[in-house]
Amino acid sequence: MLKLLETMKVDLELKGYSLNTVEAYLRYSKQFLDYYQKPIEQLHTDEIRNYLHYLIVIKKCSHSYVNVNHSALKFLYKNTLNQQWNIDKIPRMKKEKKLPVILSKAEVRNIFKVAKNLKHKAILTTVYSAGLRISEVRNLTITDIDSKNMQIRVRQAKGKKDRYTLLSQNNLSLLRNYWKEYRPDYWLFPGVPSTKAISARTIQGFFKNYLNKTKITKKATVHTLRHCFATHLLEAGIDIFHIQKLLGHASPKTTARYIHLTHKDIIDVKSPFDMIDSDYDD
């Protein structure tokens, strides 16, 4: 098994997949092999189907989780093992069309207010003010902050693309205070040891702690702040094309979902129930 996974790792790296994707595909492929405890030569289409069905029905896994497993196994069989992949017999689950959780401006402000740790606050405000993914904020370096042009350079983000996004004046002031106290050397937000960037798990951990302190009951994550960035800009009247570029979306269709999260266009629309001139308390 180890030799097979090592070969798969090389194949993934040759294809240019991100470190996170490589780790996920290897992890899910190993779980598949551990589940059957058989040589890969004995695992074919029926075994793959039954395993994905097990994830859906028995494990009650989300659509996205099952589909990542599907992608991992498809890569393993097609690329590493050079075998046919029967799309008709091993279909992907339909994507769930769920709208992301959104926090109000007041709720975002409350999270920042309870974040007394300067480094934590600097990380979370950078995510929100620039619309960053958690992987993007943790990989920022000192030189990515361009105060002269008031922008942040995001290097090799999703899709292996560089982009520039906003540098908020308030965020810049906070980052300067943070730098004076912590004096980071290379990574803007170093972890332990300081030669490494802070981990995503650490960021998620302190965000959850601050969320609990605010008594906000919404199921928000650090990524929710990125959704809030887009939604709050839309509510402020910013064109969706510009928001698309700031977020680094390849297609405007991805950005367009935020239209459904804002009250900008319907805030003055009255429900017909409010137009009925009658006593409805009886």
Image (spheres, rainbow, N blue to C red):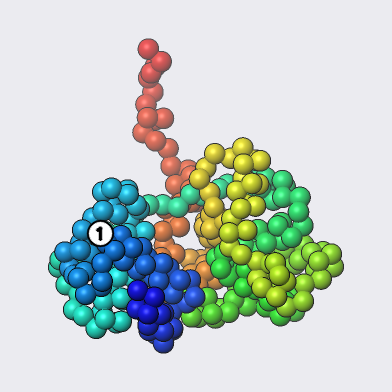
Q: Please provide percent x and percent y for residue 212.
A: 62, 41
Residue 160 point in image, percent of width and height? 48, 80
Q: Residue at x 52, y 75 (%)?
A: 157
Position of the N terminus by quadrant: bottom left
Q: How many labels were placed on the picture?
A: 1
* Neighbourhood count class around disc 1 (C-alpha, 10 Å): few under 14, some 14–19, many 20 upward: some
Residue at the location (39% across, 23% down)? 277
Residue 190 horizontal/vertical position (percent): 70, 69
Q: Residue at x 53, y 49 (%)?
A: 220
The answer to whether residue 105 is visible is no
The residue that label 1 is drawn on is 51
Please give left or right for residue 90 compared with residue 176 in the image.
left
Q: Is residue 67 above or below residue 194?
A: above
Which of the image's four quarters has the C terminus? top left
Instruction: Look at label 1 and name its amino acid.
Output: Tyr
Quick one: SS at disc 1?
helix
273 and 90: which one is in front?
A: 90
